[in-house]
Amino acid sequence: MSGTTDLSLIRAVVFDFDGTLIDTLPLLFDAMNAEFVPRIGRVLSPVEIMSHFGPTEQGVLASILHDFPDSHEAAFAGMKRYVEQADEPAQLYPGIVDLLTELRDAGIQLGIFTGKSRIMLDVFLRPLGLQPFFGAMIAGEDVSRSKPDAEGLVKVLNLLGVSPVEALMVGDSTSDIRAARDAGTLVCAAAWDRHAEPDVLAAAGPDLLCRTVAELRDALFTARR
């Protein structure tokens, strides 16, 4: 972990979703490529797909399949079906459930701010039973401006009734860091996913950079002692 930020006044923690709470990316890449191969004739690398991240999955598909405008709706339906029928659901990162439980029991409010569509957010959350932890969830279609704009983060904080100076944003991308800065919250760069780039995240200037969920847990609860 890097950073020495005072977290003692935190009343809310807002999480990004993909690559932060749940290891959705491998399944998401497979589901998208199942739609890309028949249309563009090749598998896209994770880096290629992630370069289109920001809007909802529908937006990502439309951006990549720009030469096939009539197939966007069918591609999204196929991707959703692939995820729903996967033999194993996407997995939580180690320590996430314990962290959410401890935060909730400590009276800290929890939220989600993601570029995912609400449909796909539900598809990934439902099998894991995580919805009751979160007092507010803002998805891609709930905002007019996607990350790195802070619109969605501000909406989460308003729903939770918490001021920015009392909140911590946790996310795995520079867009999360920029959104948090613009909203006026503290921000932790989550570098525990296999695709994380700690050096890139550190260069964006987060208050904290944690390579494991346990590091974040220790930072939050050490500050409250």
Image: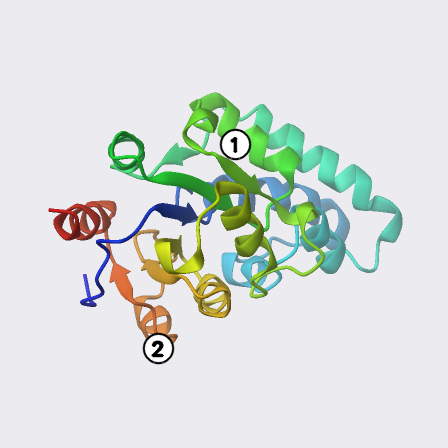
Residue at the spot x=30%, y=37% of the render? 96
Residue 191: x %, y % from top left: 31, 57
Q: Label 1's element?
A: helix
- Residue furthest to the right in view is 70
Q: Which mark is residue 124?
A: 1
Give me the C-alpha separation between circle 2 and circle 1: 31 Å
Residue 199: x %, y % from top left: 31, 72
Q: Given the image, on which type of amino acid does mark 2 rest?
A: Ala
**Picture quadrant of residue 209:** bottom left
Residue at the spot x=44%, y=48% of the render? 162
Neighbour class for label 2 at 10 Å: few (<14), some, many (≥20)?
A: few
Q: Is residue 41 rendered to the left or right of residue 6? A: right
Residue at the spot x=83%, y=45% of the render? 71
- Residue furthest to the bottom in view is 203
Residue 35 or 136: which is nearer the viewer? 136
Q: Is residue 199 rendered to the left or right of residue 185? A: left
Residue 122 or 3: which is nearer the viewer? 3
Q: Which mark is residue 203?
A: 2
Q: How is the image coloured?
A: rainbow
Q: Given the image, on which type of amino acid does mark 1 rest?
A: Phe
Q: Is residue 172 above or below residue 28?
A: below
The quarter of the image holding the N terminus is: bottom left
Instruction: Kindly indicate whether the residue at mark 1 contacts the one at mark 2 (C-beta within 8 angstroms).
Output: no
Q: Label 2's element?
A: helix
Nearer-N-terminus badge (2/1): 1
Q: Is residue 14 rendered to the left or right of residue 150? A: left
